Every structure is written in structure tokens, then in C-alpha cells.
DNA sequence: GTCATTCCTTGACCCAGATCAAGAAACGGT
DNA sequence: ACCGTTTCTTGATCTGGGTCAAGGAATGAC
């Protein structure tokens, strides 16, 4: 049995779909081609409201989307951050459990849910691949829970920056020299919603990390990391061995 | 296509396995029978340490287990609570990402991981059923993130009690009259680890809810809920329609 | 360029929940 | 019943991060 985690291009779709395998499912790729389509969203636009019927599944081609939960009094917690190549939607679920919002202009590659689910029944590897991806998300959610429940504000900020650095590195080719550079794809308020803080605290802690030389800023969004180990130490992660590897 | 979510008995195993379907996979059930075995653990015993090789998957037959994460300095966050019928383990993963601990005496129904994974390849419905279960866990984790990031101590306690009440009700037959009664399966410290609080704050908030008539206690662990709607209101959940239905 | 808007920073003050500390209640073993 | 251990409660005090408030820096439209 060969490796089903090999990523493949899905037709003219600029991202690499991870739900199918290059070597053994060419016909499935063709069928996926037939039911896929693209949708664009503007920055700030809500893609799906919690409770809405979900008519499609798909993956992010470009741009950033967030999954958030909101309480009646307006308190808001981000519960998912979708970068290019991330999958959205739950096969077998008819309604969305959370708000999905485009925080930048966004393009998604979508599959109508019903045909996609029919394909899943016929082609078992898709379900297996989705299971693997969902388990990854679950692991990430559980790391996130440690952050929310037990980390200090400073540790939360350091963690967020290193999480984005890691995601970035796995997406793009890695820079080989110079200090690591990361673009924060979120506003201070969105970071606060991610971390369970207020935007003022986010701003203060970023300033503090800057003053202490852990990071430096070019503009508001562009972060330079002179010493990644130092940042990981600040994040309180116990030896993140898999980092950037 | 009939409903694959039908629960079935797995031989003499006292719980209902949810990974297989009654009507279309009798032979799979037989194969599962052949590779399954039971393991018992004492209260307080660690089942798996984070980073250990995971040699089995399985489900809880009786007792309570927790998934926890610990930072070097000892800060601890619970990231999963396993009640009878809950599934443990990640097919496709070789090492555990979190500590799994029995908090009461515990019996698990296990399947050696390798044969289980081989079965998954052959019998697609298992992967589909596991995907469904994992998506449920992911939804629960995301609700939990809202709790950790944005709820007050009082809301956290009220949420925990109603979560346990809901899990309880789906497990046992529902009482038809009198105030709803719930046994807390956790110590105050374990509740604190669940909620991202200290045990003192847990104790104080339970006392406060008692004083305000939202709950009453019989002993330390047995909770009576005179008015469930009142409790849900205290929990800050926006109209939990699915509750106990 | 100028203006309006959005986003970010910093300061002053406050409070929910953490920390430190002392007992009280519950539980299990003999 | 007695005793040791664990678990729970309550009080006093402290503090990290929230809240309120003001102003500065980017950004984009025209």
C-alpha cells in the first residue's frame, strides 16, 4: 500500500487538494473535477452563519477565514483559523455549528455537499483522508485549549506568533537565511479573539516582547524573529520538536 | 442506503460500539470480536503518557478517564473527558499527543491498532463512522474553547454541570419526574483543570450557585438541579435546543 | 496632496480570580 | 469508633488582565 498522503493538484485549482491520492484515484479526481466550483468572498463577509444549512464543503484557495462563536452579549471566541489549503465543512452535517467569516478577500474551491458525500461512500480513501485531517484539527484544538485555559497573555502572544510561523513555513518554501519573518494575517482584535484576550492586552504584550528583543516589528503586521528558540521558550511549549521540520 | 449510525452490541462487551453498523457489517463485527480484548486500570493510573507509542484503540466500558496536557512548571489543562462508550485513540497515529489517565477504576475494550487499521482499509464504514465521531469531538472541543476563552468562573461551573447532565442523560434512561440529579464524576481539582480555574474558585462558585438556589448539593458530589433552564441561563449558552432531547 | 476611517498604542484605574493560609468535612482502613 | 488521609470550604490579600479613555499611525478614497 503506497502513501495516500501525497498531495496532488486538483485540475486548475491553485492549491493542492489533500483529500485524494495521486496514484490510485485518477478517476476520483476526474469526478471531483466535475462537481467542483469556485466562490469568492470579500474581506469581512460572512460565508456561513452558525445554524445555517451547509450546502458545500471545500478548501481555501487564497485568503484567510475564521471560525468564531459568539455569545448573546457579544463576547466572541475564535475557534478555528483557516489558511490556504485548509478544509471547511463537515460531511454528514447539515447545519454549520459556527460562524465562518472571510477576514481578507477569499477564494474557495467548493464541492456541493451531496455529490461529495456520495463520492465518499464509493471511494473510501476520501473518508480516511478526511479522518486524518480532522484528527489533526482536533489535536490543534486541544493545544489551543491549553493556551486558552492556562497560558499567560505573554505566552499566548508568543504561541500565536510561533503557530503562524509554523503554518507559514509548511505552506511556503522556507527561507534559508536571515531572521525568520512572519506576516500576521490578523488584526489585533482578531488576535484577541483567537487568544481569549482584549485587543489592548494584545497590543501591550506585543510591545513588551518587542522591548525585550524577542521579536521586532516592521509596520504593524510584519514580525521579525531573531531567535526562534527564544520565542518558543516564551510560548511555554515543552520542546516543540516538530517545529518547522 | 440505511442508517449507519445505528448502535450495536459488540459480543459480550457491555457497551454499544459505535464504529460499526448492525445491518450491513456482520462479518466485520465478527472480525472485530477476534481482535478485541479488555484492560482494567486502577483509579489514578496513567493509561498512556504523552509521546508514548499507542498500541491500541478502544472505548471506555466503565469508569472515567481524562485527556490532559501539562506544562513543564506543572500547569495542567484537561482537554478531553472520556465517559463510558467514548472512543480513545487515533488510527493512523503512532504516538499519543496527550496524557490519558483513569480518574476512577476503569475498564476499556481495546483493539490492537494494527489489525484495527487493516480492517479500516477493508471496511470503509468504520472510517466513516470514526470520522463522524471525530467531528463530534471537534465540535465539543470548540464549545470548550469558548468556555475557556470567554466565560466567567460562574458560567464555567454552570456549563460543566449542564454538560455532565447532558452526557449523563444520553447514557442512562432519563428520569421522568423530580429534580434532575447529576453525580459529578470529578474532584474539585479535576473540575478546575477542565475549566481553566483553580480549585478554590471552583469551590467558591459552587457555593455561590448553591446559595442562589440554582443547584443544591447532597454530599460533595451529588448535584440536584431544580430548574434546568435556569442553569442553562447561568451557563451563558445561547438556547441549547438539543439539550436532553 | 487632504481628509476620513480604521487600526493601533499607551495610560490610569479596577476587579475577577489567583494565591496563601487555616480548618472542616468526608472517606477508608483497622 | 478511631485515626490518618484526602478532599473541600472559607477567609485575607494580591495581581494580571480587563475597562475606560485619549490620542497617534496607517491606509485608502478622492
Image (spheres, coloured by chain):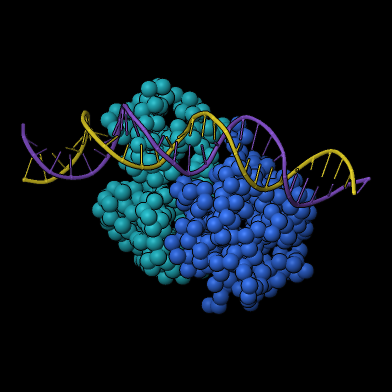
Chain colours: A cyan, B blue, C purple, D yellow
- Would you place residue C29 above or below residue B180 in this image? above
- Above or below: residue A206 compared with residue B235: above
Residue B91 image position (x, y, % from top left): 61, 54
**Residue at point 56% right, 60% down?**
B213
Q: Residue at x 76, y 49 (%)?
A: B43
Q: Position of residue A242 (x, y in %)?
A: 53, 36
x 59%, y 41%: residue: B198
In this rendered view, identify the residue nearer to me: B165 or B225: B225
Question: In the picture provided, is B119 more to the left or to the right than A124?
Answer: right
Total marks shown come to 0
Identify the residue at horizontal 39%, vertical 26% (top origin): A208
Q: Is residue A179 visible?
A: no
| Residue A141 image position (x, y, % from top left) | 50, 48
Residue A25 picture location, percent across and down: 48, 60
Quarter containing the N terminus of chain A: bottom right
* Quarter holding residue C12: top left
Amino acid at each position: 500500500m503506497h502513501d495516500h498522503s501525497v498531495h496532488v493538484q486538483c485540475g486548475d485549482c491553485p492549491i493542492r487538494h489533500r483529500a485524494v491520492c495521486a496514484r490510485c484515484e485518477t478517476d476520483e479526481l476526474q469526478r471531483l473535477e466535475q462537481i467542483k466550483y469556485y466562490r469568492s468572498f470579500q474581506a469581512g463577509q460572512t460565508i456561513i452563519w452558525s445554524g445555517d444549512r451547509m450546502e458545500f464543503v471545500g478548501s481555501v484557495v487564497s485568503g484567510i477565514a475564521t471560525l468564531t462563536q459568539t455569545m448573546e452579549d457579544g463576547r466572541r471566541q475564535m475557534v478555528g483559523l483557516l489558511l490556504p489549503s485548509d478544509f471547511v465543512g463537515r460531511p454528514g452535517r447539515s447545519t454549520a455549528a459556527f460562524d465562518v467569516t472571510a477576514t481578507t478577500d477569499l477564494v474557495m474551491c467548493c464541492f456541493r455537499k451531496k455529490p461529495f458525500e456520495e463520492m465518499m461512500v464509493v471511494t473510501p480513501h476520501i473518508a480516511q483522508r478526511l479522518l486524518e485531517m480532522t484528527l489533526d484539527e482536533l489535536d490543534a484544538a486541544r493545544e489551543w485549549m491549553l493556551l486558552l485555559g492556562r497560558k499567560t497573555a505573554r505566552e499566548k502572544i508568543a504561541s500565536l506568533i510561533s503557530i503562524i510561523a509554523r503554518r507559514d513555513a509548511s505552506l511556503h518554501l522556507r527561507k534559508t537565511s536571515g531572521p525568520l519573518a512572519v506576516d500576521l494575517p490578523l488584526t489585533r482584535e482578531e488576535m484577541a479573539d483567537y487568544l481569549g484576550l482584549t485587543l489592548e492586552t494584545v497590543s501591550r504584550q506585543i510591545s513588551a516582547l518587542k522591548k525585550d528583543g524577542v521579536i521586532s516589528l516592521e509596520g504593524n503586521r510584519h514580525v521579525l524573529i531573531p531567535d526562534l528558540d527564544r520565542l518558543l521558550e516564551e510560548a511555554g511549549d515543552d520542546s516543540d520538536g516538530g517545529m518547522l521540520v
